[in-house]
Image (cartoon, rainbow, N blue to C red):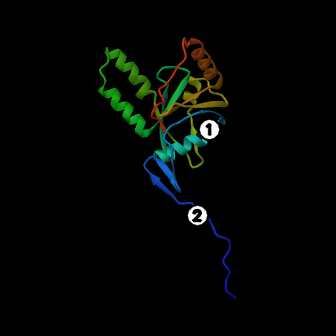
Amino acid sequence: MPKRPGPPVLVRRQARLGMGTLLGDAAVVLKHFTGSHDHKMDDKGRVSLPTEFRRVLDAVGSSGGLYIAPQLDDPRAHVVFTIEAYSALIERHNAREYASMQAQQRMELKLVTRASQIQVDDMGRIVIAKPLRASIGLQKQIRFVGVASSFEIWEPSARDDFEADLEASLDEPVFIDRRGLH
């Protein structure tokens, strides 16, 4: 007996295009870390990256390795860079002329000496080393905060305090020119 054809099957074509993905006729560009995401960390310092962040890492081809360093402007957080973004930051640091040797060494202490490479495992998790956790008071809860080309790791109440202080310090509304954006 001949096999009867079943119902039509929809096939989703997916092809890489630079920093995004093409699904049918619509391009989805995933190249910026955005949003605020609370996650739980286990006793070994393992925590799952937000799904949105993993998608960005996949899109920019940096799903395996990252660099983590103290946040340059606030000691209550760490900043996480893709390998490419960290390399660009180091190049920028090397090209910069500092006002003093001490200022250069202070930046190198944060940017290089206290930085470390971390891996994203097959389950989309990273491990935050105990000294890094202790330096910003991480316990069980972590807040990931997207800041476009990188993301930050905060203890949630410290981030809440930071945002409250920031809101209180704004003297006037902040506007951005959105003309020409598509």
Report the number of discs: 2
In the rendered image, the vertical position of residue 171 relative to residue 125, given as above or below: above
In the rendered image, the vertical position of residue 158 relative to residue 150, given as above or below: above
Q: Quadrant of residue 43?
A: top right
Disc 2 marks a residue whose amino acid type is Val
Q: Name the residue tied to disc 2.
A: 11
Residue 28, position in %: x, y? 52, 47
Q: Residue at x 48, y 41 (%)?
A: 31
Disc 1 marks a residue whose amino acid type is Val
In front: label 2 or label 1: 2
Residue 176, position in %: x, y? 49, 25
Discs 2, 1 touching: Cβ within 8 Å:
no
Quarter that holds the N terminus? bottom right
Q: Name the residue tied to disc 1.
A: 47
**Nearest the camera: 88 or 178?**
178
Crowd band around label 1 with a 10 angstrom C-alpha radius: few (<14), some (14–19), many (20+): many
Q: Quadrant of residue 92?
A: top left
